[in-house]
Amino acid sequence: MQKSIERIAGDSEGVSYEFPVFRFDGTDKAGSSAYLQAALHAGELPGVVAIDALMPMLEKAEAEGRIKGSIIVVPQANPIGRAQYHFGEHQGRFHLGTRTNFNRGFPLLAAPDVELLPDTTLGTADQRLKTRLLQLSIGHDIVLDLHCDDEGLAYLYVHARLWPAMADCAAAMGVDAVILWDEDTDGTFEGASITPYLNLPAEVARFDRRVATTVEYRGILDVDGALAGADAEGLYRLLVARGVILDQALSTPGSFTGIVAPLENIDMMPAPRAGAVLYDVKPGDRVAKGALLATIVHAPGEAGGRTQLFAPQAGIILTRRSRRIIRGGEDLLKLVGDSKSADARAGTLED
Ligand SMILES: [Zn+2]
């Protein structure tokens, strides 16, 4: 394993950012290769501690000569967001300098060729970081981008072209749900990882061996040793299932039994009023159409000071907010409906 340090120059004199990159060279040049990164949204740490638990497993496999394909690991992909504090609160989702989401605005290339990427010396620091991350990841058969939600189940976003071929990965990782999407107009990292292959002939794109996914490791507070260990084992099982690592002791993953739904089935439930949120449901709950989801207390102590929200269709609660303060129009939760949402929104994913 080799460690190197990437440097991204800041946008003013005297400022620069660094992040470590770990490389494991495989013994078989034809073996499937993998790229893993965490904390692109810099405050989302469940994936960071999962990688911390995974690294000793990779080092053991390397010492025993069991790593076939090359592996690149970036445990903390966003040193710019990591450093952003605003009035004492960490802000790792948007770049404060440009107000751009760190998981939007990645270049969507026409082919998986790093030569097509913008010059890494151009643009603002966040744009140059994005270009560098793509440069590191493009060309790998397996690209995993580890995130988390507010409060939620463990779930994956997967492009529809990779499903059901990726069902073994979902089973290996032990996630609860898979959300399928089919068009990225915003330039998410996942979109930038799979879009270059979509117009290639099938024998070149090799969707049967390709993996690209945004992994949502539950909620922002689920930074926990036991979960990290279980998630590391899930990542390791995926790498074994896809032939990146050899491990005779592991059996092949069974079939995936979790929820699989298209993105258009998700109801986000925008709040009709500002106030304090009282949830009546939590992630994992199955709800019937018309079930009470939440009550917003907008005029405390007054008659008519509460507004209730009901499920527009039957489904499963995937996520909810981690804070209980809300403004009008902000989304209250993600309900994975049994059919298409009347409020289905365009776009890639809600990460
Ligand atoms: Zn995220």
Image (cartoon, helix red, strand yellow):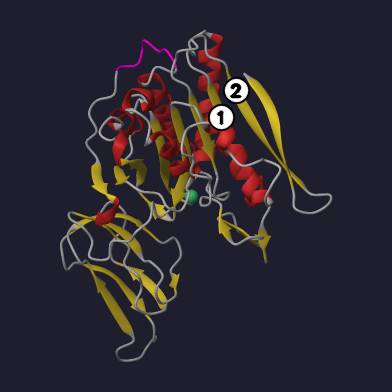
Structural crowding at the residue carrying mark 2, measured as other residues with C-alpha within 10 Å and reported as few (<14), some (14–19) or many (≥20): some
Of residues 261 and 85, the one nearer the viewer is 261
Q: Is residue 310 above or below residue 122?
A: below
Q: Is residue 249 above or below residue 166?
A: above
- Residue drawn at 29 percent across, 24 percent down: 253
| SS at circle 1 | strand
Residue with the mark numbered 2 = 23
Residue 176 located left or right of residue 12 = left
Of residues 166 and 237, the one nearer the viewer is 166
- Residue drawn at 45 percent across, 13 percent down: 30
**Amino acid found under the numbered disc labelled 2:** Arg
Of residues 194 and 8, the one nearer the viewer is 194
Structural crowding at the residue carrying mark 1, measured as other residues with C-alpha within 10 Å and reported as few (<14), some (14–19) or many (≥20): many
- Residue drawn at 35 percent across, 44 percent down: 155
Of residues 143 and 230, the one nearer the viewer is 143
Give the x, y percent position of residue 254.
Answer: 24, 25
Give the x, y percent position of residue 208.
Answer: 31, 25
Q: Would you say residue 286 is visible in this rendering?
A: no
Q: Which residues are drawn in magenta?
A: 245-251
**Amino acid found under the numbered disc labelled 1:** Val
Question: Badges 2 and 1: C-beta atoms under 8 Å apart?
Answer: yes
Tag on residue 332? Answer: none
Q: Would you say residue 295 is visible in this rendering?
A: yes
Q: Is residue 262 above or below residue 249?
A: below
Residue with the mark numbered 1 = 73
